[in-house]
Amino acid sequence: MDPSKALEVLSEFGPDGLSVSELIDSRTNGGLTYNDFLVLPGFIDFSADGVSLETKVSKNITLKTPFVSSPMDTVTESEMAIALALMGGIGIIHNNCTSEAQAAMVKKVKLFENGFIADPIVLSADHTIKDVLEIKRRLGFGGFPITDNGKIGGKLIGIVSMRDILFNKNYDTKLREVMSTDLVTANSGVSLSEANSILKKSKKGKLPIVDHDFNLVSLLSLSDLMKNLDYPLASKNPVTKQLLVGAAIGTRMADYDRLAKLVEVGVDLIILDSSQGNSVYQIEMIKHIKSTYGDKVDVVAGNVVCREQAANLIMAGADGLRIGMGSGSICITQEVMAVGRPQGTAVHQVSKYARMFGVPTIADGGVGNIGHIAKALCLGASTVMMGGLLAGTTETPGDYFYLEGKRMKKYRGMGSLDAMNQSEKTSTDDSGSQARYFSESDKIKVAQGVTGSVSDKGSVKSFIGYLTTGLQHSLQDMGIKSVSELYPAVESGKVRFEQRSPSAQLEGGVHGLNSYEKKLYSTA
Ligand code: IMP
């Protein structure tokens, strides 16, 4: 046959593979997991690095990458939230701690990166080296302006940096003895770019901004300047330039107070943390958040796995939904509770419905590789939430230890006995993690998660870089230029699927080798 007729003849066959509804329908008797299907390749006429991963995590919050970290006490505290926001995603700070500790972690993220730091930590000449070291330990940075009254607005008299105190072991030494008084400053009213060039020329770490009486107005930091250059995708508030951060809460009485504390320190996204979100408690909490703080925070409700659950939460005003029940890598909910749903089916059924109301969804749990992320987005999710995939990175809480010669970190379910017992110890109120899985009237704690360990993965910044590049290549293979175009292309039938039999799954993995080493990425 004439090769120029190839396209014409193709149309006689009808589209190859399955549409998304055929894929879902084909599994009504078993449910679909990410491993049960593949996406068929499309046509490439663009480069992978041009693929946009911009997406919404909730109605009013847009991210440059679709990555969200789980609110778990072995995954997300300030360090993870900062790293993820720098890489274009968002971290959700866990609530297995007192409300004060959780608010302090949110604050640390908000303080991390600023244009002009309007509310810097300021010390007086009577503070000591010990005070500086203590603040450095708590907040992670170590250069402070010194004013006559120890407050912003006071007259600037010096600046102390780690270099000034490094070799002084007398921790009671007053800062007046060690501070630098040879100061480079800029006058208030200076533009950010002018201030940045003064800072660069000065070769100092900090640039205090002062008024005409030499009173301290704000501060500019060199490390922020470097970070601004290094992280073009960073998730930031466009006005304050602060990083975006989320926090988990429950729905008990004490959570209303926890919520107020989190809003006060500037949290952007609240996640109602429950394994079964379809409850009168969530509906009440959503309404409270929307009526009290609707202009300040978005609220994501859940978890849900079916449309009926989603309907109640959407009607109550949820800005996003979190999907997943029993798919988490540390989860035994399906085994113990007999409830849940295979994650692929759950993500599609809820996302397709939620999209009709403009409510973005987060596919939560069971994400073990880049392919799973791509498939979750194909099935309609706007973002993915990851626990196990990020566990073991440097930025997760906890120390490394060695197990059978391998460097490990602990990773545990928030419904594990280990986490629930910790919650009892550290939460002064009743709003910690055990509220997710355990009612106060219960006499016995029934575990819904396990405790385990995961290998050292290095810095999450490199790891998210790997996920970002890998996901861009995945979309390129599908012939799709952006996350926002993906689901419409899936719904229209342009993106096609194939089921994956057990032998197809074996074929798609590494096979037939005596031994091999699986290295996932290397940096240039
Ligand atoms: P992973 O990414 O597969 O490890 O799953 C993480 C997700 O599992 C979290 O975001 C939670 O939704 C869920 N999860 C966390 N702790 C537990 C638990 O103890 N039991 C059941 N699910 C959990």
Image: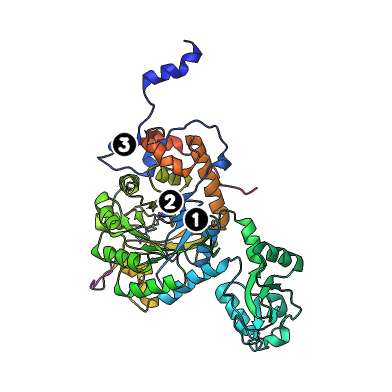
User: What is the spatial separation of the Cα atoms under label 3 and label 2, in whole angstroms?
Assistant: 21 Å
Residue contact between numbered discs 1 and 2, judged by CB atoms under 8 Å? yes
The stretch in magenta equals: 440-446
Q: As shown in the figure, which amino acid type bears the numbered disc 1?
A: Gly
Q: Residue 259 appears at what percent x and percent y?
A: 38, 71
Q: Residue 68 appears at what percent x and percent y?
A: 45, 56
Disc with the residue nearer the chain's start (1 vs 2): 1
* Viewer-proximal residue among 131 and 38: 131
Residue highlighted by disc 2: 383
Q: Residues within 10 Å of mark 1 (few under 14, many from 20)?
A: many
Specify whether tag 2 is near ligand 1 (CB below 8 Å).
no
The reply, left or right, for residue 259 in relation to residue 150 is left
Is residue 441 a member of the stretch shown in magenta? Answer: yes
Is residue 454 a member of the stretch shown in magenta? Answer: no
Specify whether tag 3 is near ligand 1 (CB below 8 Å).
no
Residue at (60% x, 65% y) in the render? 115
Residue contact between numbered discs 3 and 2, judged by CB atoms under 8 Å? no
Q: As shown in the figure, which amino acid type bears the numbered disc 2?
A: Thr
Q: What colour scheme has been applied to the protein in the rendered image?
A: rainbow
Residue highlighted by disc 3: 21
**Considering only vertical position in the picture, is 503 above or below 316?**
above
Residue highlighted by disc 1: 89
